[in-house]
Image (tube, helix red, strand yellow):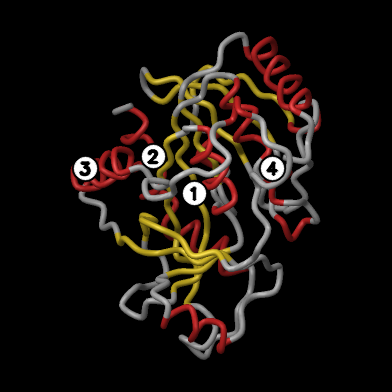
Amino acid sequence: MTLPFEKYRETADFLLERLERVPDTVVVLGSGLGEFAEGLQNRVEVDYRDIPNFPASTVVSHKGVLHRGSVGEKEILVMQGRFHCYEGYTMEQAAFWVRALRLCGVKYAILTNAAGAINESFSVGDLMLIRDHIKFCAESPVAGRHEEVFGERFFDMSDAYSAFLSGVVKESAQKLGIALREGVYAFMAGPQFETPAEIRALKILGADAVGMSTVYEVISAAQCGMKVAALSILSNMAAGVSDKPLSDKDINEAAKLAGGRLFALLGEVVSRL
């Protein structure tokens, strides 16, 4: 760990005071999915810029606001936007919120993102539950000086995508009649989209989708004992899978296509925790 522990503690203390109480569950909204936060009841908002040591969210579709609010009778935190390495952050900085919220007592994280489909049996607009990931870059969000309060230095990743939480997601999807794919998510740092050759290599290695977020958050959460489930909206077919040039406009279009189903699923999932 390269960031001093005191920075995490300062952030946690600020949030505990500002929010008065911190629920045990956080939902992180990916690109084009911020609308879910607007539906919370009894909202309390904190701009990321006001939170000590928090990075700034520089992507247009990531508003950069932390919410505490209710879905039915369940109170949750919602992060309206996240941080990415392609914005210039280290993995530790991009995953900073994980350790800070863990110090606040958060136990569960439901992560969402937009991803490109590699698996040709998938379609644009599908929802995919991530069951595992592939990461090739050497950087890790938990490298550097070790703080035992955040867990062991060497830790198991077999249940990084919690079997318990993933089971809740699948049961919720079945109850609502929402079709849910499952697959392996490959992390690529971006911001450029992948080449067709990279996509062919990832397909051979077993990846079903590819994206530029989420994985560093999952690694940090696995170390500090936060249970995670992660969902992707498949916003486009990856490079070389179709002849269509890739564009970030696909993300917002896919969010409109699948957002209603995802928001309903998130609501059902958090009500069960």
| Residue shown at 77% from the left, 51% from the top | 89
**Distance between the alpha carbons at the discs numbered 3 and 1:** 18 Å
- The kind of residue on which mark 1 rests is Thr
The residue that label 3 is drawn on is 171
- The kind of residue on which mark 2 rests is Leu
- The kind of residue on which mark 4 rests is Lys
The picture quadrant where one finds residue 132 is bottom left
| Residue shown at 75% from the left, 51% from the top | 90
**Distance between the alpha carbons at the discs numbered 3 and 2:** 12 Å
Q: Secondary structure at mark 3?
A: helix
| Residue shown at 39% from the left, 20% from the top | 74
**Distance between the alpha carbons at the discs numbered 4 and 1:** 15 Å
Q: Residues within 10 Å of mark 4 (few under 14, many from 20)?
A: many
Q: Secondary structure at mark 2?
A: helix
Q: Residues within 10 Å of mark 2 (few under 14, many from 20)?
A: many
Rendered location of residue 149, percent (x, y): 60, 25
Q: Residues within 10 Å of mark 3 (few under 14, many from 20)?
A: some
Q: Which mark is residue 266?
A: 2
The picture quadrant where one finds residue 28 is top right
Q: Which of the two residues, 220 or 229, is positioned nearer the viewer here?
A: 220
Q: Which mark is residue 112?
A: 1
The reply to whether the C-beta atoms of the residues labelled 4 and 2 are less than 8 Å apart is no
The residue that label 4 is drawn on is 63
Q: Secondary structure at mark 4?
A: loop
- Circle 3 or circle 4, nearest the eye: 3
Q: Which of the two residues, 26 or 260, is positioned nearer the viewer here?
A: 26
**Distance between the alpha carbons at the discs numbered 4 and 2:** 19 Å
Q: Quadrant of the C terminus?
A: top left
Above or below: residue 31 compared with residue 15: below
Specify which label sits upstream in the sequence, 3 or 1.
Answer: 1
Q: Secondary structure at mark 1?
A: strand
Specify which label sits upstream in the sequence, 1 or 2.
Answer: 1
